[in-house]
Image: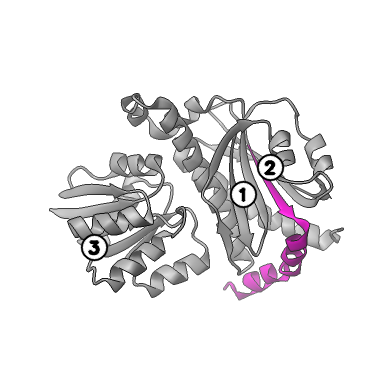
Amino acid sequence: MKKILVVDDSATSRLLFRMHFPKEYPATIEEANSYDSAIARAGEIRPDIIFLDYNMPGKNGIDVARTLIGSGSSAKFILFSANLQQGVLDDAQALGFTKIIEKPITKEKIVSALKVITP
Amino acid sequence: MNLTEIQHDILKEIMNISVSKAATQLSVLLNDKIQMEVPEISFLTLSKARESMPEDEENAIIYQELTGMLSGRTYLVFQGKDSLFLAQAVLGDAFSRSNDKPQFYEHEAMMEIGNIVISACISTIANLLKDRIALSTPVYMEDSLPRILLAQSNDSDIVLLIRTTLHASRRDIPGTLVMVITSELAGSLINKLPRFFELIEKRP
């Protein structure tokens, strides 16, 4: 059973993620809505996979990954955002994000990201 | 500030590509076919821009601030305040299940719609011009766009106004995308237009 953390300031986006998450995939899903809550929640549950929105108030999703990687997290990071500027993609790739998916989220996009992690 | 014919044409094509991307994302989100109008582009004072918009119309508006290569705001404007309909279209059954806080999810869904549409459009502009544009988180308001523009800027400000309308085929709520760019950075946008050709030339 994989532990997944979804980080997005939008409650709608988190709800859409749960709606589209494949029911057959063995996982528990936890949520965080900000940089601070993501760092705290990741410290508590030690997630295997973290889905990160980019554009959040204050620090963005890449900042969350950078902090967690710096503190020794072994989670796989997946960026999901509508803001796929080349500069954002470059930052995510430089940090070793496993997959980048474009919002709006669909079941197919989540499945494609999960396949990269557990083929 | 006046645009030459070629500058106007490049800008229109960049906006056409960028708004098409936004329309595609809205289409996925609403599961509906989206038709879009060719973007209108003009340099004018804010007061002139406001005059071209219905003053008393109540709108559901989501906007995001732009900084970096461009400075200004992008607004996604839906006629009327009936955002419930759009929230239901996006969230489906989950919206009815969340009926303990319907207004919260209604506004939340509108902000997410705005975020996806505006981010798709702005990311495409940034990528076509090989630069970065930072976006704030979305803000949701129910008001008329001219009143919001007046509250956020001065009537004498010269702005680059880019406007297009997106129509969802099965739903009768047209969404208008309005970009108001402050004139200082509109100049730098125009200087970067030749990059669009560099990008095309590099394609195989």
Q: Residues within 10 Å of mark 1 (few under 14, many from 20)?
A: many
Residue contact between numbered discs 2 and 1, judged by CB atoms under 8 Å = yes
Find residue B199 and report its image quarter: bottom right
Report x, y in % for residue B171.
Answer: 54, 27
**How much space separates mark 2 and mark 1, taking CA atoms?**
8 Å
Q: Is residue B24 left or right of residue B3?
A: left
Nearest to the observer: residue A88 or residue B153: B153
Q: Is residue B4 left or right of residue B192?
A: right
Q: Is residue B3 above or below residue B109?
A: below
**Pointer 2 and pointer 1 on the same chain:** yes
Report x, y in % for residue B99.
Answer: 35, 24
Label 2: which residue?
Answer: B164
Most frequent secondary structure within the magenta stretch: helix
Write down the region rendered in magenta. Answer: B176-204
Label 3: which residue?
Answer: A117
Residue B179 belongs to magenta span? yes
